[in-house]
Image (cartoon, grey):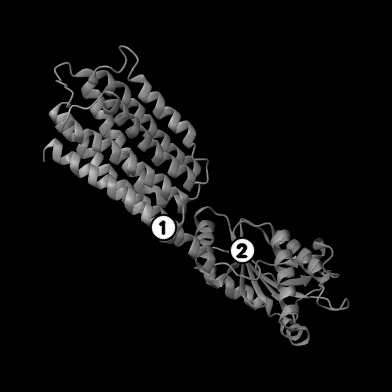
Amino acid sequence: MDAFTLHVSTAIVSAMMAISLLAFYVVGHRQRSLIDWSIAGGLFFVSSCIGLLSYSFPIPYWLGPSLANACYILAHLGLLAGIRRQLQLTPQWPSMILIAVIVFLMHYVPGFLESLTSRLLYIYPLLMLINICTVLTIILAAKSRKLHAIYYPFLFAELIFFGQQFVRFIFVAFDKQLTLSAAGNRVLQSSGTLAVFTFLMLITLSCCLIVYRQQQLKLQDVTQVDPLTGLLNRQALPHRAKQVFELGLYQNAPMAIMIVEIDSLPHISEKYGYGGSDSVVKHVASVLEFTAHINSGIFRQHDNKFVLLFEETSTDQLQRLTVRLKEKVANLVIKPLHDDVRININIGFAMQSDNDHNWQILMQQAERVLKQPIKQVNTSQAASVQELNVDRFGFIAQQN
C-alpha cells in the first residue's frame, strides 16, 4: 500500500473515531471523556487531511506543516485528557492547547523547525513524552486492579506507538544517508502512516472498551450492594470470601467469619411494621460498620443476618468485638420503637485452620455456634474478657 492510500485510510479511521465516540456519548453513556477522545479523533482527521492536500496542491507553510503538526500533537494530548478525566483527574485542556500553540509558533523560529529533519527530531521526542505521560497517568492513578485491567488495551496501544516512534527517531537522528524531502522519506513516511493507522484503530476500540467495561463494573457494584443498608449483599459474599480464605492459606494470615443475627426481628416487624424493622436493620448495620473497622467486608446475608470477614485476627480480638457489638446494639434507641424495646443480637464466629478446605466450612461452623443455646453468655457476664475461655469456633464458657 502506497503512502497516499495509507493517508486516505488514516483520515477515514480518524473520522470514524471522532464520529463513533461522539455517537457513543450521545446514545446514553454520557461520559465526558468520550467527548475528549472524539475531539482527539477530529484533530487526527484535520492533520491527515492537510497531509492529503500536500500530495495534490502546494499548501502554505502555516497550514502544513505548522498547523498539521500542532493538531497532531494536540490530538495525542486529547487522548491524555480523556484518560485523565476518566480517572477523575483534571483534563488540563488549557495547558495542552498552550503546548499546541507553542509547537505551531516554533515553526517560525529561524533555524529551529525549518527543515523536515529538525522538525522530526523535535516532534518525535515530544510525542514519546506524551505517550509516557499517558502510560504513567494510568499506572499511578488507576490503583485498583479491576480498573487496571480495563486500561490494558489502551496501555498496549500507547506503548506500541512509543516503540515505533523511538525506532523512527533513531533512524532520523543517526542515519546520515537517509533522504528526506517535503513529502518525506518513502519508507519512513509509509511506516509512520501505517503505525498511525493501526494506533487509531486500537485506540478507538480501547476507548469504547474502557467506557463499556466501566459501566459494567458500576452495574455490578449496584447489583452487589444492599439498598437498605448500603452494605454488600449475599451475591458479593462468595467471591470475596474465597479471596480472603486463599490469602489466609498463602500468607499464613488466618481468616475468620463472624455471623451476626438480629434477635426477634420478625416480632418487631409484626408489631411496628416494615418501617420499624427496617430502622432496626439500618441501625445495627451502622453499629457493625463503625465498630468492626474491617476492610474485608460486611455483608447482609438475610433480612436479619450479617456476615463479617476478617483477615489476620485472633479469637481474643473477635470475642472483645463480640462484647462491644452486643453492648452497643443493646443500648440503641430507635425512634419508631418504644423506649423500653431493646435490640439483642446473637453472634457466632469461626477461625480458619489448616484442616479447613474452603470458606464454606467456616460459615457452617459459625452458624453452629450461633445456634448454641447453652454456652451463650450475656454482655454483663462478658464484661471482662479475661474471665472467658474462647476456642476458635467462638464457643464461650466460664473459666473454672
Asked whether residue 24 is in view, the answer is: yes
Of callouts 1 and 2, the N-terminal one: 1
Write down the residue under mark 1: 26
Is 322 left or right of 155, judged from the image as shown?
A: right
Which x, y percent locates residue 375?
75, 77
Crowd class of label 1 (few under 14; some 14 to 19; many from 20; radius 10 Å):
few
- Which quarter of the image is occupied by the N terminus? top left
What's the residue type where badge 1 is placed?
A: Val
Q: Position of residue 279 (x, y in %)?
A: 74, 73
Residue 117: percent from the left, percent from the top?
Answer: 23, 19
- Give left or right: position of 46 versus 306: left
Give the answer, above or below, for where 270 lies relative to 258: below
* Secondary structure of residue under mark 2: strand
Most distant residue in the bottom direction: 270
**Residue positioned 40% across, 24% down in the render:** 102
Q: Name the amino acid, label 2.
A: Ala
Tag 1, which secondary structure? helix
Which quarter of the figure is the C terminus placed in? bottom right
Residue identifier under label 2: 256
CA separation, marks 1 and 2? 48 Å
Image quarter of residue 195: top left
Q: Residue furthest left?
A: 1
